[in-house]
Amino acid sequence: MTTTIDTASGPATPPAAPGGKPPVVRRRTEGGAVRHTGRTKVLVLVGLALFALYSLAPVWWLLVAATKGQRDLYTTNGLWFSEFHLWDNLRDLFTYQDGIFLKWMGNTLFYGFAGTIGMTVICVACGYGLAMYEFRGRGILMGCIIGSFLIPGALLTIPSFLLYTDLRLIDTPWAIIVPGFFNAFSVYLAKVYAEGAIPPELLEAARIDGAGEYHIFFQIGARLMSTGAATIFLLGFVGAWNNFFGPLVYLRSSEKWTVMLGLYSWLKVKVDSSVDLTGLVVVGSIVSLIPMVVLMISMQRYWRSGVTLGSLK
Amino acid sequence: MAVETPASPRGIRLPWRRVMALKGASFTFPFFLGFLLFTVVPVVIALKESLYTEQGSGLGFGAKTVEFTGFDNFVRGFEDAKFWSAMGRVALFAAISIPLIQLTSLGMALLMDMARARTAGRFRIALLVPYMIPGIVATLIWIYIYSPVVGPLTPILGFFGIDVNFYSGEMIWVSIGNLMAWSAIGFNMLILYASLQSVPRELFDSARVDGASEWRMAWSIKVPLVRRSLVLTTVLSIIGSLQIFSDPMLFRSMTPETVTRDFTPIMAIYDWAFAQGDFNYAAALSIILALVVGIASAIFYRLTNKAPTS
């Protein structure tokens, strides 16, 4: 029991907070204790720099390519700019097939927000229930959650397709949104977080004051879990934005597609016909990243704590 | 705290503890209802469907006869050479790529941990950029980078006299592996780095006082400390790799000859279900794949847990 509480206290105080200077950071920079030789230091920096280059270069290529006209894309150096065509490319992107790209972006945002908000509410409540109450069957429920991590998504796809066909969900947004509500990993994160963030004494005190259990959840539990909930939301949203297999299998009509499915369909066109959509795919890829990057940057501290939350198990 | 409520609204006397437990359990009801419908029911359907075989035309869902054929689909699956060669391809790929990705992630995490906190903070953002890129876009980027027509890689390598076709049969797994490494290493590294950071610094200070070098400390103290995280990320990678789908699917758009439609097990399952319309057989193959994934994860877990723990 103590271990779970220890691990869960991690996310509340993420290590190496960006601005603050927690005492841990003073290591090794202190005068006497430094044993770094110059060689080690150089090796560390070179290693990190090389890897940073590897991480960033492909994205750099994408940024450069998006500014080029179709012909320059094939003829000029991929790593440097030539004539600046970004605005033309964007106009092409948003006008192609009556602006279907914008529709895809809207769909993805809608599926992402609707699915992830519902998922966060349901999974945080479930995690809170599992962490804060003793009831019969709790062990079995926890077992189901851990066990379901091992179920490969592949096993579920075919039967889900048959099930959704019976439920008349195929080719409706609900086939993407509703199943996303029930994410076992989010429940697990919520439970770990609740154990660390909510002192049971506080709930006891509220009970003595006569508060009902639901009232306590909304007034105390949910508030103390807000950081954890934000983390769960963020990780869920990333997952929803990346979802490819689901829309590919469950959505038929192109006006319901997500951005990722749309870009895939454009990539496929290149093989099937003489039309070349490479330029559109490149600039579309960049535009599809924007909501993600905005969300990630604005919620930085949450996903950092999310990573820590996942790591300490 | 063993106080009993005087009278519950409905007039039945329930012990206060039981009411509370029930209310607590009710927080979990919505999730487990959905879990039942969207996870348990599909598993049951898969088990059931795999035991039946559709006879006749196989057009649509209307007039078809479905017969109980027992384990026929499984026998067929176990004898399906194409499915198993797909499985073998992916297993070999996983066996090579996962250790490489894990070792690199560990190496990067150790380097980050050796660097000064401010330097590490700056690099962390750069190393995490690939994590912010959705998988499909990452694949698209690399497909173009590999491309002999638009990509910069072929001319650069050509300059050094190296002539590679990234889409060829020999190179395709290297190409896919590099793409997966690019997407995965940053995130794995951050997980490992976070668990290194959570180690009390006094441990390192005392090792340093005892005269241990940075490299010695990395090997003898830090690596054992992050073993649990390594095991976790490895199991997740095994589960993920055996189910690889979208990356080869996108590569297929570029080189349909190299990346066949049953290139990976999931692609084969997808093809059977949605191109050939044989859901029963696809369900059986899904179950076989699930078994393989489960066994592989279990073996790995057993092997790593036999070694002495930290």
Image (tube, coloured by chain):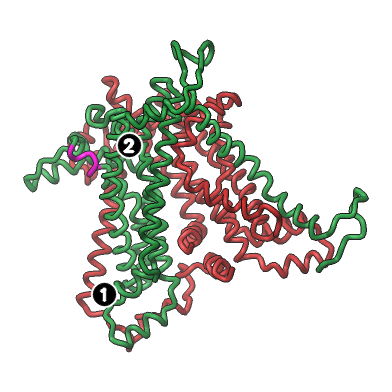
Chain colours: A red, B green
The secondary structure type at the circle numbered 1 is: helix
- Residue that label 2 marks: A282
Between B14 and A30, the residue placed more toward the observer is B14
Between A85 and A162, the residue placed more toward the observer is A162
Between A26 and B212, the residue placed more toward the observer is B212
Query: Residue at left 50%, top 27%?
Result: B49
Whether B83 is drawn above or below B133: the answer is: above
Residue B66: percent from left, percent from top: 51, 17
Is residue A168 visible in the rendered image? The answer is yes
Q: Residues within 10 Å of mark 1 (few under 14, many from 20)?
A: few
Query: Residue at left 67%, top 49%?
Result: B28
Looking at the image, residue A155 sits to the left or right of residue A190; the answer is: left
Whether A216 is drawn above or below A57: the answer is: below
Residue A41: percent from left, percent from top: 25, 74
Between B190 and A208, the residue placed more toward the observer is A208
Q: Nearer the viewer, mark 1 or mark 2?
A: 1
Residue A301: percent from left, percent from top: 50, 61
- In the rendered structure, does residue B138 fall within the stretch colored magenta? no
Quadrant of the image for the N terminus of chain B?
bottom right
- Residue that label 1 marks: B215
Residue A177: percent from left, percent from top: 56, 36
Q: Which residues are magenta?
A: B170-175
Query: Residue at left 50%, top 67%?
Result: A14
